[in-house]
Amino acid sequence: MAGTPTVHTNTDPALVIQQYLKEFLDLAVRRKWMILSFVFLGITVGGILAWLKVELYRSETVILIEQQKIPEKYVPSVVGGSTAERVSTMTQLVLSRTNLQKVVDEFHLYPKAIKDKGYEEVVAGLRENIQIKTKGGGEVEAFTISFAHSDPIVAMKVTAKLASQYIDQNIKIREQFIEGAMEFLDQELMLAKAGLDQKEKELSEYKMKYLGELPGQLDVNLRTLDRLQLEKIQVQESINSLNPRLDLLQKSIHDYETM
């Protein structure tokens, strides 16, 4: 059979090695096209793998989260949810298909892929190249945004764009908080003043109606007057307690506006 080594009876090692080399060379010549095919295939596969292995550059930025400056004992949270939940809400908005498509168009990302596959797959691929990681313990203190791209400049610009969108969303939430806090305190103040007016009216009407009646009813009338007077004082104190809360809110608004 072709290619089967010959059994040598010659005991001279040099002659045996020479004979083996001759037979292997003859085999290589007979099957040269097969050998060349394997070599060509190896070179081709290696080239394809090298072409597919595109180096990616990842740009990263850190966003610090400013905690609410207005204590909840003065103004209950009107935004709702923890900081982590608010970050999650902002992430859903920033990574939405509509928003990411705008990012793709603004930075002219993946034009060939858009033509071949459409926006749906391109946006999904973009989302996979974006990483959002929170930092901190039970309460989120900061989070990082990073984006990977073959062009380091593009990676940096897209990361900066995403970070600015998070900041914009945070500003909107902050404005909603301030508006809600002002509305909450205004409503409380209005109710307290209405309560005070009502107590003053009741006190005045009671004095006009019952003062000067039979002496036997004097003790009851005085106790009723004391109760109404006490309720009036309590309402007045409630109004007074709103003043530091309003002052704190005004100071917080000023701090936000000067940031």
Image: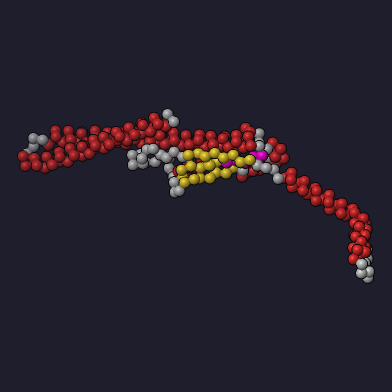
Q: Quadrant of residue 205?
A: top left
Where are the magenta residues, as a range?
146-150
Q: How many marks on residues? A: 0
Residue 23 against residue 139 in the figure, above or below: below
Question: Does 18 appear in magenta?
Answer: no
Residue 46 against residue 234 in the figure, above or below: below
Q: Is residue 133 left or right of residue 10?
A: left
In-front residue for pair 228/185: 185
Residue drawn at 8 percent across, 40 percent down? 218
Residue drawn at 62 percent across, 32 percent down? 106
Q: Quadrant of residue 78?
A: top left
In-front residue for pair 99/41: 41
Residue 39 place in picture, x, y as percent: 83, 51
Q: Quadrant of residue 192?
A: top left
Residue 124 place in picture, x, y as percent: 63, 43
Residue drawn at 66 percent across, 37 percent down? 151
Decide if residue 115 is in sight here: no
Q: Is residue 4 left or right of residue 86?
A: right
Residue 256 place in picture, x, y as percent: 42, 32
Question: Does 147 appear in magenta?
Answer: yes
Residue drawn at 49 percent across, 45 percent down? 135
Q: Is residue 141 left or right of residue 50?
A: left
Q: Where's the N terminus, which quadrant?
A: bottom right
Q: Is residue 200 left or right of residue 219?
A: right
Find the residue positioned furthest to the bottom: 9
Residue 100 against residue 45 in the figure, above or below: above
In-front residue for pair 40/21: 21
Residue 11 place in picture, x, y as percent: 92, 69
Find the residue positioned furthest to the left: 215
Decide if residue 204 is in sight here: yes
Does the magenta stretch mainly form a helix, a strand or a loop? Answer: strand
